[in-house]
Amino acid sequence: MDLILILGTLALVIGLYFRNNPLNHSRKFMFRRFLNWFPLGMTYAFLYMARYNLNVSKNALGTMMNKEAFGIIFGAGTIVYGLSFLLNGPLVDKFGGKRGMLIACLGSSLINVIMGLVTYLMLKGTITGNVVLIFSVLYSLNMFFQSYGAVSIIKVKAYWFHVRERGIFGAIFGTLISFGVYFAFDWGQVIADAAVLNPTKQMTGVQNFIRTIFAIDTGTTDATWLVFLIPAMFLIFWGLVNLLMLKDSPAHANFDDFDTHDASSGEMEKDFTIKELLHRIFTNPVLLTVSFIEFTTGVTRNGILQWYFIFAKEVPQPGAEFFKDNWGILLCMAGTFGGFLAGWLSDVVFHSRRGPPAGVLNGVMLVFTVIMSFILMTSPVGVGICAILIFVTGIGVHSLMSGTASADFGGRKATATASGITDGFVYLGTGIQSLCLGYITTWSWQLWPVFLIPFSMLAIYLATRIWHAIPAATKHYLIHVEKISIVTVEEVEERQLVNPAPQKP
């Protein structure tokens, strides 16, 4: 059933892509662009699987990787991931998204193979070293290579999608993230269950296939190492597909490049140094605001993603077992809906402005977070619904900010640097919520949703600061091509200076 839902969702996403053509691209171009983003996107989804397989391995390894050890390992990887963007973002801006994605595939697959080998040797008793130290180093290396993938997908998108199309691509981006979460948690758990030497429950056809191919029943321990090896195999496959199919820009695929009307319009001939790229981002007030919104998203989205499953395990949820048992596929469907809702609001309702839908979605998030805080211990079904709806809005905001706004205001020349820094702020928020909620929920689960409320409120305020923000080239396009009246942040500020609000006596 899950596979049918995934395939149906994928078909819907592809159908919506081909129906959304506001610039009237040729059918040939639309199909070639599909052959570009589809393998690129699926690669990113499987990078997620090769990232969150640590969560699955933690449960499968039992006492070999306890809660404290997992927290340190995951935290180390998160820090490295966030800091890596300061280097990897500018590098991808220099040598292109295709190379960046290939580095991500090859690097992450190699490290996952090594983590699988280390797990095998530990289960065999050959390695008896410090599990925390060994996996912290390896997982940090994995996350270093993973960061290349995050910026590369946005870098390639910036050349192939016009600003007026990027909201929908942001939706596709959100969907692919959701697929990655599903692959990581649901497929990863299927692999972990199949890897058990002496299973106590009936195996599915896929699990029996895994057990036969890897001759699990002939071993002496659980084959938990497969949790790392199989995602590595997927990455190698998609890496080869990208090598053959992926092109950095339309010109590389024998089409004419076109002006996407983002912040790089008129300066495509300039060659920026790494220092200039970083200065360009850190001195841009809009991109800094986008980054801080992403910081709040890292807290709120991952505050639900990581903790609802643990909450449902520790606090019985009678009548709401559906949410815990289908958490991966529910997150996938919710993320897909959230991404497309945000993209539609941005491109259609707000004419490719990113601030307004971010504010609206965070407002909805705030409402359901407050409701969740009141019903946490009294309505299991209500809590499950609130958790899913909070994730819907969180993915929507994330797909717009990291997947779209960073490309708009960074421009094609600085897209990877801009998206890398905004994504780094996401993981800063992720690390803070992980550390704080780890302690807070030990005192009382009631404080869990309460902790998230201020961050939603902060995000709403920040979204109002960029409500009218739009790149100058985008504004010019909308006014002169689509005949849409657009008000920018600068014009609002000018009006306030010319016509200041009357002072109260």
Image (cartoon, rainbow, N blue to C red):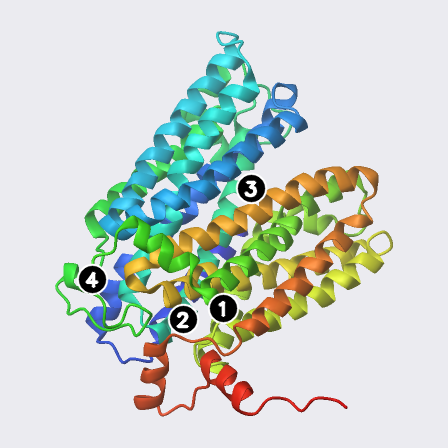
- Lower position in the chain sequence, tag 3 or tag 1: 3
| Image quadrant assignment for residue 496 | bottom right
Q: Which residue is mark 2?
A: 16
- Lower position in the chain sequence, tag 2 or tag 3: 2
Q: Which residue is mark 3?
A: 185
Q: Which residue is mark 4?
A: 270
Q: Secondary structure at mark 2?
A: helix
Within 10 Å of the Cα at label 2, are there few (<14), some (14-19), or many (20+) other Cα atoms? some
Which disc, if any, is residue 340?
A: 1
User: Which residue is nearer to you in this view: 196 or 150?
Assistant: 150
The nearer-to-camera label among 3 and 1 is 1
- Kindly indicate whether the residue at mark 3 contacts the one at mark 2 (C-beta within 8 angstroms): no
Q: Say whether residue 274 is left or right of residue 335.
A: left
Q: Residue furthest right?
A: 378
- Kindly indicate whether the residue at mark 1 contacts the one at mark 3 (C-beta within 8 angstroms): no
Measured in 3D between alpha carbons, the distance from the residue under mark 2 to the one under mark 3, in whole angstroms, is 27 Å
Q: Secondary structure at mark 1?
A: helix
Within 10 Å of the Cα at label 3, are there few (<14), some (14-19), or many (20+) other Cα atoms? many
160 vs 140: above or below: below
The nearer-to-camera label among 1 and 2 is 1
Q: Is residue 40 visible?
A: no
Where does residue 195 sit, x and y in percent of width and height?
52, 25
The nearer-to-camera label among 1 and 4 is 4
What amino acid does circle 4 point to? Lys
The nearer-to-camera label among 3 and 4 is 4
Within 10 Å of the Cα at label 1, are there few (<14), some (14-19), or many (20+) other Cα atoms? many
